[in-house]
Amino acid sequence: MNCRRIRKNIIDYMSGTLSKEKTERIKEHLLSCAECSQLIAELEATSHLVRSLDRAKAPAGFESRLQTRIAFQQSVKTNRNPIRRFARDFARAFIGMRRLSLRPVIAGILFCIMLGVSILMIINNNVAQATDQAFISVCQEQHISFAAANPLADDSAVLLKDRASDLANEL
């Protein structure tokens, strides 16, 4: 362990709340590092001094006033954040439920997805049909103008013109 990690875990080491493995690593480090050993010695001396002082008694009613003030501060903090309040209320609503069935929720989500995909397919199909119809109309117009410019080629211009008027009547 390095000195920074020792300082990070020093309080837990002194109180004896670290795992055996970490405690052993800290002890090994203290054998080789005079600076960390001196720091622990100073902290232990300070702790011993503080424990040797006479305990002062709190004024009458201090604890009840303190508890009331802490409760008030906590309620103010939780009520300030609407997202936290919503999450808390949502969690409380489901604490009493033994089993939460997600099947209706999943079915609803799948239905919405299928409905959305169907609508997109219909829209896409209508756009494709309109595009195809526009392309066919352009081709017919070009062919009619070509056939009109070259009347000896064939009589397809007349047939296409009739077909174009039939399509226009259908729409």
Image (cartoon, grey):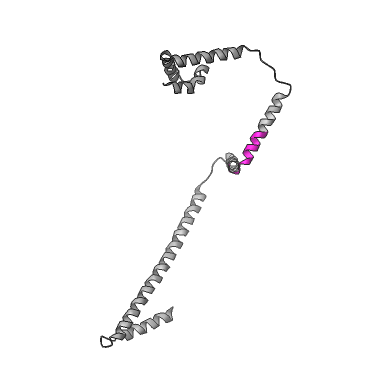
Q: Tell me what residue is drawn at x 33 percent, y 77 percent.
A: 139
Q: Is residue 49 left or right of residue 30?
A: right
Please identify the residue farthest to the front as the structure is shown.
35
Q: Quadrant of the N terminus?
A: top left
Q: Is residue 71 above or below residue 26?
A: below
Of 168 and 112, the residue lying toward us = 168
Please identify the residue farthest to the left as the structure is shown.
153
Residue 117 falls in which quadrant of the image?
Answer: bottom left
Please identify the residue farthest to the bottom as the structure is shown.
152
Q: Tell me what residue is drawn at x 71 percent, y 28 percent.
A: 65
Magenta segment boundaries in residue numbering: 72-83
Residue 78: percent from the left, percent from the top?
A: 62, 38
What secondary structure is the magenta-colored segment mainly? helix
Residue 68 falls in which quadrant of the image?
Answer: top right
Residue 45: percent from the left, percent from the top?
A: 55, 12
Q: Is residue 63 above or below residue 81?
A: above
Residue 161: percent from the left, percent from the top?
A: 35, 84
Q: Tell me what residue is drawn at x 42 percent, y 65 percent.
A: 124
Residue 152 colored magenta? no
Q: Quadrant of the C terminus?
A: bottom left
Q: Is residue 76 above or below residue 17?
A: below
Say how many tags the image has. Answer: 0
